[in-house]
Amino acid sequence: MADFQHLITPALTFSGVALISLVCQLGAWRLRLPAILFLLLAGILLGPIAGLLSPDEFLGDLLFPLVSLCVALILFEGSLTLKFEQLKETGTVVRRLVTLGALVTWGVISVACYWLIGLDPALSALFGALVVVTGPTVIVPMLRTLRATQRISQVLRWEGILIDPIGALLAVLVYEWIAAQTAGDNGFTAGLLIFAKVVCYGTVAGVAGGALMATAMRRRWIPEYLEVLASLTLVLVTFTLANELAHESGLLAVTVMGIWLANARGVDIEEILVFKEHLSVLLISGLFILLAARLDLGALLALGWPALVLLLVIQFVARPLAVWVSSLGSELNWRERALIAWIGPRGIVAAAVSALFALRLEQAGYEDAALVSALTFAVIIGTVVFQSATARTVARLLRVTEPERRGVLMIGANAVARGLGEVLQKLDVPLLVVDTHWESISQARMKGLRTLRGNPLSTQVDSNLDLTGLGTLLTITPERERNALLNQHFRRDFAAHRIFTVRNERSGTNERMQISANHEGVPIGPEGMTFSKLSSLVSQGARFKATTLTEGFSFTQWQQEAGKGRTALLALTPERRVRVFSPEQPLQPEADWTLIYLETATEQPAPKREADSDPVLPDQAAQS
């Protein structure tokens, strides 16, 4: 064993942690479960159980500053997502959940921890603040398998996004208070003064850092390709300087800096946010394995039933009470409230911040500080495992799941997509249109379509994408490679036979230059119907229309009358399921099916044969 340990070099250890992190992320992606669960379990297996990884011995004096800097970057990235305008748009229930509900959760858990575990009141308050946070990294994977109603999904998703920085700020403030009390040798007054100093310096440093970065970006002092590097550097500088001015004020400073930058006018932080997301995934993946490897399982298991009762209080008392208080007077019915109360898994911020605070408080002389981190990790594992296993069953029992994924996710908001989307909307088909171009999205919104502006391949858009009720993917862009990449990306959310794409012209005759058909979706429309042809027809006046077949007016008759002036692209079954015309999936529509087709401007419809001059509603049938 000694010889084996001698072979484990620092380079091999870092490489091994990186490899295990990737395996955990891939496993979470395949199983649609929060990655944090796999990362924590991997760390526990490598550390306390197998004894192969000891972060204290491996990193030595570098452990504390490394964890501190990583947590600072994670908090900054999370605070970049908190825009005050979102608080106005998310509704009363979400605003209450992240404010009043967070305070109720904090109070209940703190008292329960004090009475059940016997921790110091200050440490109990810190633990309560740490486990207030849920977070999108644990909520979104659960929602994708849950298929809850849109109203429930929106509440849970927005709560997870907004509670991240707010809960982290609460935990930082509680910790700063404890640190101030520890440093204040002259009692409560001295501790209060130190706390005020920490909050003041942290806030001022954060505002200064955020204002400086926003001004530099707004006035183009920094070229675009250096904005990410500049923001990363300024975060580290702000964190370090704030700690020098007032001990332990750095975390508050970077949180305030991120919130300031997120709400600065005339500043585009999308590139910074995307990079920080990738950096956070890298840091979180490796950091959590290292932190989980430090857990004292013996001390946690020694707590016995009190720890289990604490977990039950969090699940069945704190969360339901917070949801009940936050939803008073809202439009949510009791079933929706019950499911929201059932779901509240703890996530990344809680684990990272708790481990850092445990390290610092241990150095400050708090003997039970390690229990705070161990209890936090136990709550994360307990809530994720229990709720992932039971949430879908509970949702079905409460009858708050979407009936069937009959809607359409449409990538592209160009003229072709807008015309098709307008018909789908008039037929009451759930629809979400996603595009990166502001002008196209604006025109889609003017037509009343539900839209989302952003790149579906970005981490931010992907994690916030509401796919509730959407079971068909249509990629309608002029870029063949982009369509293929999008189709591959969404195979985790849509069945392969429900992913469709418009054809695009091939770039050449050389097969070595072509995209494999395996990477593309099922083609839409008949042979020869490409995006450029569709776009050309629409620009010349062609319009998407709809008509409903009857017993007296069959699909064959429609085809005979349509001639070459009409091309059927989609159809709706009597059960309102979307079907797509494609050579790979032949369709034979019957009575009560609704056809969606493109009619060229030159084609004159047969008089009084079918009422299809405009998109018809499902209850309108064509007359023969």
Image (cartoon, grey):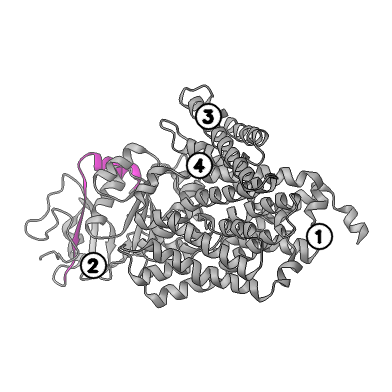
Image height of 503 relative to 336, above or below: above
Residue nearer the viewer, 94 or 278:
94
Tag shown at residue 80: 4
- Which element type, helix, strand or loop, lies under badge 4? loop
How crowded pointer 4 is (Cα within 10 Å; few <14, some 14-19, many 20+) is rated as many
**Which residue ends up furthest to the right in the rendered image?**
3
| Sooner in the amino-acid sequence: mark 3 or mark 2 | 3
Residue 154: x %, y % from top left: 39, 58
Q: Residue at x 50, y 72 (%)?
A: 316
Identify the residue shown where x is 30% and y is 63%. 331
Position of residue 44 relative to residue 213, above or below, is below
Locate residue 290, reporting x and y percent: 72, 54
Give the mark nearest the N terminus, 2 or 4.
Answer: 4
**Earlier residue among tags 1 and 2:** 1
Disc 1 marks a residue whose amino acid type is Leu
Vertical placement of 442 versus 216: above or below? below
Disc 2 vs disc 4: Cβ atoms closer than 8 Å?
Answer: no
Residue 37 seen anywhere in this rendered image of the structure: yes
| Discs 1/2, front | 1
Q: Is residue 549 found inside the magenta-colored segment of the image?
A: yes
Mark 3 vs 1: CB contact within 8 A: no
Callout 3 amino acid: Met
Q: Which residues, given as a range, are shown in magenta? A: 530-550
Query: At label 2, which amino acid type do we have?
Result: Trp
Which label lies toward us, 3 or 1?
3
Q: Is residue 454 magenta?
A: no
| Residue beneath disc 2 | 593
First in sequence: mark 3 vs mark 1:
1
Residue 461, image x, y percentages: 46, 48
